[in-house]
Amino acid sequence: MSSWRGVLALTLVVRDEEDILAANFDYHLAQGVDVILAIDHGSSDGTPDILRDYERTGRVRSFRDEARPHVQAPRVNRLLRVAAEEHGADWVIHCDADEFWMSAIGSLRDVFAAISERYGYIQVERRNFLPVPDGEEPFYRRMVVRQRRSLNLRGTGLEPKVAQRPGAAAAVAPGNHDLEAPVMDPAPNIGAVEVLHFQLRTFEQFERKVIRNGVGHERNQ
């Protein structure tokens, strides 16, 4: 583990993620993340119980938001402020429950410790893992094939994800793909980190996600 003494935080906005949330927490905490900040907006499954269990470790904080519209960016920006003002974060990773930030060498903590102070953020490529027939094994044992080049629904390259120093920008763009009006330069992408994306784990999970997000977008003004 790196001897770097900085604070590495991670943000998550979640809803009905009981099948993957604990794995996400365990992985990123083992990679050197100091604190995970999560907003749960209206979960009706076991997600709130998982959040309460991990809050007892002192390394996870969660907030409940009952608003139904699907508005991710304001929620992420709220967590960014908490990370900076209440936890003194040096770096903040903006993540989704189905994303796992993986370093090429060493831990995530090693990667962020090595980034020059002249750079304020990094954009990291994502890799989709292919869906497989439902089974009894956990998703990370079933889903072992990833696309060499991942595409979005429009058929173009899958958008990256972003991590930042709090001082690099006050707001994150929708989808956590970029920053709004950054005032620092991005670090060059040298392949030190990639995001493993497990978005289609079972048919039932995918169906729930499509319906839930559709209803959330319909409620946006």
Image (spheres, rainbow, N blue to C red):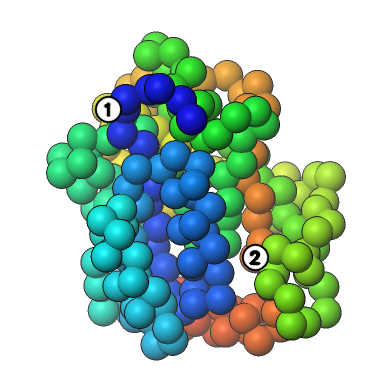
Question: Vertically, is 33 above or below 214?
Answer: above
Give the residue displayed 80% in from the left and 59% down from the top. Answer: 144
Spatial distance from mark 1 to mark 2, Cα to Cα? Answer: 31 Å
Left or right of residue 46, residue 55 in this image: left
Give the residue displayed 15% in from the left and 44% down from the top. Answer: 86
Are there few (<14), some (14-19), or many (20+) residues within 10 Å of tag 1?
some
Left or right of residue 154, residue 121 in this image: left
Are there few (<14), some (14-19), or many (20+) residues within 10 Å of tag 2?
some
Number of the label disc, if any, that sits on residue 21: none
Q: In the rendering, at what x and y percent does residue 38 appear?
A: 33, 61
Left or right of residue 19, residue 55 in this image: left
Number of the label disc, if any, that sits on residue 199: 2
Give the residue displayed 50% in from the left and 26% down from the top. Answer: 110
Amino acid under label 2? Gln
SS class, disc 1? helix
Q: Quadrant of residue 137?
A: bottom right
Q: Nearer the viewer, residue 185 or 126?
A: 126
Q: In the rendering, at what x and y percent does residue 26 appear?
A: 49, 57
Q: Quadrant of residue 190?
A: top right
Give the residue displayed 37% in from the left and 14% down from the top. Answer: 117
- The quadrant of the image that shows the C terminus is bottom left
Residue 178 visible? The answer is no
Q: In the rendering, at what x and y percent does residue 116 appear?
A: 44, 13
Q: For mark 1, what is the residue?
A: 167
SS class, disc 2? loop
